[in-house]
Amino acid sequence: MGVLSGVRIIEIAGIGPGPFCGMLLADMGAEVILVERPGPAEIPTAGILRRGKRSMELDLKDPGAIDTVLELIEDADGLIEGMRPGAMERLGLGPEVCLARNPRLAYGRMTGWGQTGPLAQAAGHDNNYIALSGALHYAGAGDVPPVAPPTLVGDLGGGALYLALGIVSAILHARGGGKGQVIDAAIVDGSAHMMNLLLDLSATGLMREQRGTSVLDGPHWFNTYRCKDGRDITVGALEGKFYKLLLEKLGLADDRRFAAQHAAGQWPLQRAAMAELFATRTRDDWCALLEGTDACFAPVLSPSEAAQHPHMKARGTYAKVDGVLQANPAPRFSATPSEAGPVIRK
């Protein structure tokens, strides 16, 4: 009985952000009915994005299957689809038809480029969308091409999460007496919207378009470093008091090379010196010295390592279900806790 108990969502099977959005809503207690084509899955899956959902197989090229989906829509609060613009209309399941059957429906559309615009019909993936939106720009040092974590910034951050918020908001609007509506959740829009914090910093001069020269992508005190054992750590001592503590912990408090925290012209030399220092000890050594302090430190962990970290274990952030490592639902609700449903393989 999660916070979305009593909400019914119809999910037209797709890949990536659409299924993730459905999983998120199911985690929160929504009844999610997954409509998928007969036969084996197009892409092999461990079933995490299917957890907590009900599944039914329908061939949407069959007119009888379309009638079945429309019947499901009559009693639904929301719909998720991730096809190219126009595909649902050609199937007979476009917004006009569905909203005629259910005027309060939140019709959620998940695409990379959006329903309109010159690129609307082009193929693409996460890295393409966040490249065009500007969200990829700061992901890396200034002397190498930017690299972002696969799917996280675009498909999931700028896509699935914005679609989920849009659907829930439209459902609230309809339940308050408003009409149903279409949610055009484009990854280029969502990932661009996520840039507003950096754009605010840019307007004040704290972020510059030249990568490697700004407070969040260039300093020695906000960076990732390789340790003696080949593993990595991060520091993010942005505030002066945290920077002072970091230097004290590292034995650099009296080192004149690090006296000027915000002298951008010195950052390359300071980064090199700090990299040389971190390379003298193992990641575990640095964890023993810095973890849990206000030096703003954390080791770079693999997912399997993260699942075993004492902090993550104490919070129960990860779990293994039928041998499949997965993250438990987030965020957490005090009165209506979310629950991860069983992993469903196809």
Image: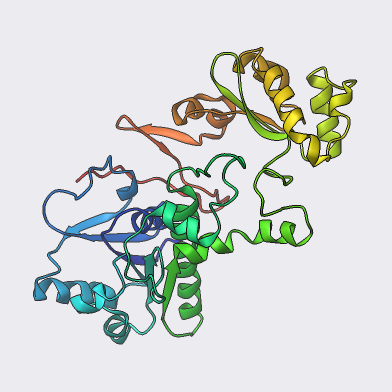
Residue 71 percent coordinates (x, y): 21, 76
Q: x and y percent of residue 139 in the render?
A: 57, 45
Question: From where the camera sits, is residue 3 visible?
Answer: no
Q: Quadrant of residue 246?
A: top right
Res. 259 in view? yes
- Given residues 64 and 242, the one toward you in this image is 242
Q: Residue at x 48, y 85 (%)?
A: 178
Displayed quadrant of residue 150? top left
Left or right? Give the position of 287 relative to 247: left
User: Quick one: quadrant of the N terminus?
Assistant: bottom left
Q: Residue at x 30, y 85 (%)?
A: 96
Identify which residue, 244 or 97, lies in the foreground: 244
Tell me what residue is drawn at x 54 percent, y 50 percent.
Answer: 331
Does residue 270 lie above or below 123 as drawn? above
Q: Position of residue 159 (x, y in %)?
A: 45, 59
Q: Position of residue 320 (x, y in %)?
A: 38, 31
- Quadrant of the rendered image containing residue 8: bottom left
